[in-house]
Amino acid sequence: MAQRELTFRIMRFNPEEPKKKPVLQDFHLTEEPGMSLFIVLNKLREEQDPTLRFDFVCRASICGSCGMLVNGTPTLACKTLTKDLPEITTLLPLPVFKLLGDLSVDTGVWFRDISLRTESWIHTDEPFVPDAPEERMDNAVAQKIYEAERCIECGVCIGVCVVANLRPDFIGAAGANRVARFMIDPRDKRTEQEYFDVVGNDDGIFGCMGQMGCEDHCPVGIPLRDQLAYVRRKMAVAGWQYKKA
Ligand code: FES
C-alpha cells in the first residue's frame, strides 16, 4: 500500500513574544507503519524545526504530559496513531492551562492549585507512629480509592469541559475525582460540612453542567460521571443540613 503524505497543521506561538500572533504552520511527513503523534512530533523537531515545543515523557499514557487538541478533540498525543487520522491533522494546545509555547502547556500549576484548594491529603488526629503495623482496609474500599488514584493528571477532562473553559476557577472532573478519593477514604476524618465549605459552590461540584465530555475523553477510563455524582450527592445533603441548622 502506498505510503500517505501527511500534513500537520500546528499552532505556533511564543508567549514571550506576545506581539506576534499565533499562526498555524504546516509540516509535511511521510507516514510510516505504527506511527504515533509522539514519533511525528519528535521527527518534526529533529528534522525540520528544532524550535517546535511540545511535552512528552513516558510515551505510554502514564505521565499525562502530552495532552493536546488533535483535530479539535482533547486527547493524549502519545496514544494517537496516524493511521486513525486524516491526511491533514490540526494540532493545538489544550485550552484552560497556561500556554508555555506551541503545544506545550503547564498543567502542573493548575493541579497544584486544585490540590491545595481541596486539601488533597488525609486529615486525621491520629498520631503518626512510624513503626506501627499497616492498617487493614476493606478490599472494596481500597479498590474505589485505587480507581480514583488512576488519574494521570493529563488535563484532557479539563480541556474538554465547557464550564472549565468559561470559568477558570472551576474544579472540573479531575478536581471532583480528587475530592471523591478522600471522601471514600475512611482514614480521612473531614466532615461533609467541611468538604461543603470547599466544594459546595459553583466553582466546585455544583458548577458541572452534566455534559460529560470528561468521561467520554478520559484516556485512562476513570468513571468520572460516577465520581461527580458521588460528590454532588454528598454535598447536596450537606447543603440541605446546613440550611436546616
Ligand atoms: S507522553 Fe506520557 S502520557 Fe503521553
Image (cartoon, rainbow, N blue to C red):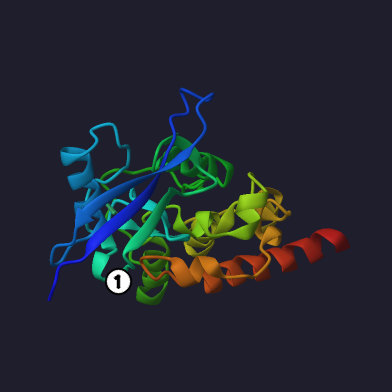
* Residue 165 at x, y percent in the picture: 61, 51
Q: Is residue 208 left or right of residue 135?
A: right
Q: Is residue 44 left or right of residue 190?
A: left
Residue at (67%, 71%) from the top-left corner?
233
Residue at (47%, 23%) from the top-left corner?
17
- Element marked by disc 1: helix
Read off the residue under disc 1: 84
* Residue 62 at x, y percent in the picture: 27, 56
In the displayed structure, would residue 209 be above or below residue 191?
Answer: below
The answer to whether residue 61 is visible is: no
In the displayed structure, would residue 68 be above or below residue 46?
Answer: below
Q: Is residue 149 left or right of residue 17?
A: left
* Residue 141 at x, y percent in the picture: 42, 71
* Residue 160 at x, y percent in the picture: 53, 59
Quarter of the picture holding the N terminus = bottom left
Foreground: 202 or 104?
A: 104
Residue at (18%, 62%) from the top-left corner?
31
The answer to whether residue 46 is visible is: yes
Foreground: 34 or 88?
A: 88
Foreground: 243 or 62?
A: 62
Amino acid carrying mark 1 in the image = Asp
Quarter of the picture holding the C terminus = bottom right
Q: Is residue 36 left or right of residue 197?
A: left
Circle 1 Cα neighbour tier, 10 Å, few/some/many (<14 / 14–19 / ≥20): few
